[in-house]
Image (cartoon, rainbow, N blue to C red):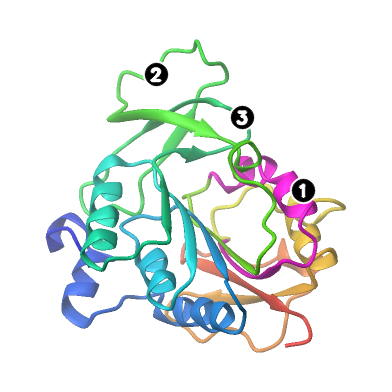
Amino acid sequence: MCTYPGPLDNYVSRAVQATGCWLECDDVTFMQRLLQSTTSPLLIDVGGNIGFYTLAAAAIGSAVAVFEPHPINALHLLSSVRRNSFRSVQMHTLCVSDAVAPCTLGEHKTNQGALKHSTAEALSAPAPEAAKFRTMAVPLDALLPPPRRPTFLKVDIEGDECKAFCGMTCLLNASAGTFVGALIEFDKIQCCEELVGPNGAFWVLQQRHSLCTFVARVARPAQTTPTPLAALCSIRRNGRQINLRWQRCDG
C-alpha cells in the first residue's frame, strides 16, 4: 500500500507503516465480512483517502467504485491498485454532493484524511482564493446507475455527508434490497433529523434495505444491539469519531 511519510499523515499512513493497519481495522473487517457473504459484491467508497477500504475490498475480490477528489491521495490510491494488479477498481477524482458544481479542496499538514471541501452554488461561481485544489462535484445519481448486485456503501467526507446523501436519492431508492451493509462517519453530520425522517437516507436504508445500525466509536468495541432511528440524533458527540455500521436486521 502506498502511504505518505508519517509526519504528513499521522492517522492512517503512520499507523499502517507501524502495524499494517489503523484505528478503523474492526470497521474494515466488518465491511469485508459482509462483502464476502455475497456473490459479485460492489463497494461504493465515498471519500477514499489513500484507499484502505478500497484496497481491502479489492483484495477479497469485490468490485469498487471509489470517489477521492484530492489528486495526491488519488495518486497514492491508484499506485496501490496498480502494484497489486487489482482490475475491478473504478476511480473517480470528484467530490460527491447534491449538484454538479465546482469543488474546492483545502489541505492539512498532518492528516490527509481530514481534508475539507466546499462546493459553489453555481457553475460560474469563483473558487475561494485559498483553495489548494479545484475539481468538480457530482451527485452519485448523475454518475452511477442503481446497483443490481450486493452493495456496501461507505461514506466518510468530513462533514459533507448531508449533500452527498441528497445526491444519491435515486441510487438508494431504486435498488431496494441490494445494499447489504454500510459504514458512515456520523459525528460530523449536521442533518440527522432529515436522514432519519421519512424518505431520508437512513430511513431508506432501514425500510427499503432492511438494515439496522450499530454505533461504533473508533478504537472501542461496536455496540452489539442496534440503535433505533429515533434515538440516533440524541447520541452524544464528544469530538471522537463515531461510525455507524449498517447490516441486515436479521443478522
Q: Residue at x 28, y 52 (%)?
A: 112
70 lies above or below 55: above
> Which element carries disc 1, helix, strand or loop?
helix
Measuring from the top left, give residue 130's x and y in whole percent.
30, 24
Give how far across and how far down residue 200 sits, in percent: 78, 51
> Label 1: which residue?
194
The image shows residue 18 at horizontal and vertical percentages of: 17, 78
Q: Which dot marks residue 99?
A: 3
Task: Determine which of the numbered discs, if any, sits on residue 127 in the image.
Answer: 2
Is residue 178 within the magenta segment? Answer: yes
Towards the viewer: 153 or 41: 41
Distance (Cα) linking label 2 and label 1: 29 Å
Looking at the image, residue 162 sits to the left or right of residue 76; the answer is right
Residue at 42% across, 13% down: 126
Q: Quadrant of residue 2?
A: bottom left
Kindly check if marks 2 and 1 are in contact, taking CB atoms under 8 A apart as contact. Answer: no
Magenta-drawn segment = 160-185
The mark nearer the N terminus, 2 or 1, is 2
- Residue density around tag 3, few if under 14, some if 14–19, many if 20 or more, within 10 Å: many
Q: Amino acid at mark 3?
A: Ala
**Most foreground residue, 6 or 84:** 84
Tell me the distance, in whole angstroms, between the alpha carbons under discs 3 and 2. Answer: 16 Å
Given the image, on which type of amino acid does mark 2 rest?
Ala
Q: Are marks 3 and 2 in contact (CB under 8 Å)?
A: no
